[in-house]
Amino acid sequence: MKITTFLTDKAVLAEIGQRLVQRRLELQLTQAEVADRAGIGKRTLERIEAGHSAQFASLIRIFRALDLLSGLESLIPEATPRPMDLLKRKGKVRRRASRDHRSKPIGKGWVWGDET
């Protein structure tokens, strides 16, 4: 199954769990071996493979044990500022998000509510 935005959180967790099972089986590892390599309990691994939620640190440990950690680089690439943003900010790094104040909603704007 492809992970898309249309899937529920539960479905995404189930798919990740199944993919971890497939990877573990490809490497000919038991749940106990992966849990030991990852430094987590076997029951924790069982729950993750069954599609239950888990702490992110546990997932990272499992990814490391299954040699999947490098995949996180493509999942969440390092953000680099665009060249035009660097020029606008004169080399300063952005630390806060803000709205674009120039864009206003199209329409009548704010009303009291008794004009209808």
Image (cartoon, rainbow, N blue to C red):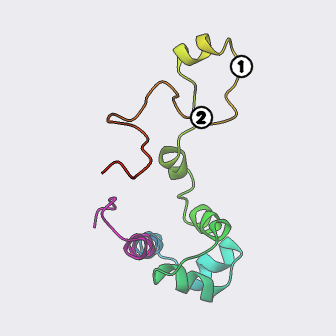
Q: Which residues are magenta?
A: 1-18
| Position of 33 relative to 115 (above/below) | below
Three-letter code, disc 2: Ser
Mark toward the start of the polypeptide (2 vs 1): 1
Query: Does residue 69 show up magenta in the picture?
Result: no
Disc 1 secondary structure class: loop
Residue toward you, 14 or 86:
86
| Position of 80 relative to 55 (above/below) | above
**Side of 109 where 82 appears, left or right:** right
**Side of 35 where 52 appears, left or right:** left
Disc 2 secondary structure class: loop
**Side of 115 where 62 appears, left or right:** right
In this figure, which residue is indicated by the disc labeled 1?
92
In this figure, which residue is indicated by the disc labeled 2?
98
Q: To which quarter of the image does residue 39 belong?
A: bottom right
Across and down, in percent, residue 24 comes to 48, 73
Mark 1 surroundings within 10 Å by alpha-carbon count, few (fewer than 14), some (14 through 19), many (20 or more):
few
Mark 2 surroundings within 10 Å by alpha-carbon count, few (fewer than 14), some (14 through 19), many (20 or more):
few
Q: To which quarter of the image does residue 90 belong?
A: top right
Q: Residue at x 53, y 46 (%)?
A: 76
Q: CA distance from mark 2 to mark 1?
A: 16 Å
Q: Residue at x 47, y 70 (%)?
A: 27
Three-letter code, disc 1: Lys
Across and down, in percent, residue 104 comes to 43, 31
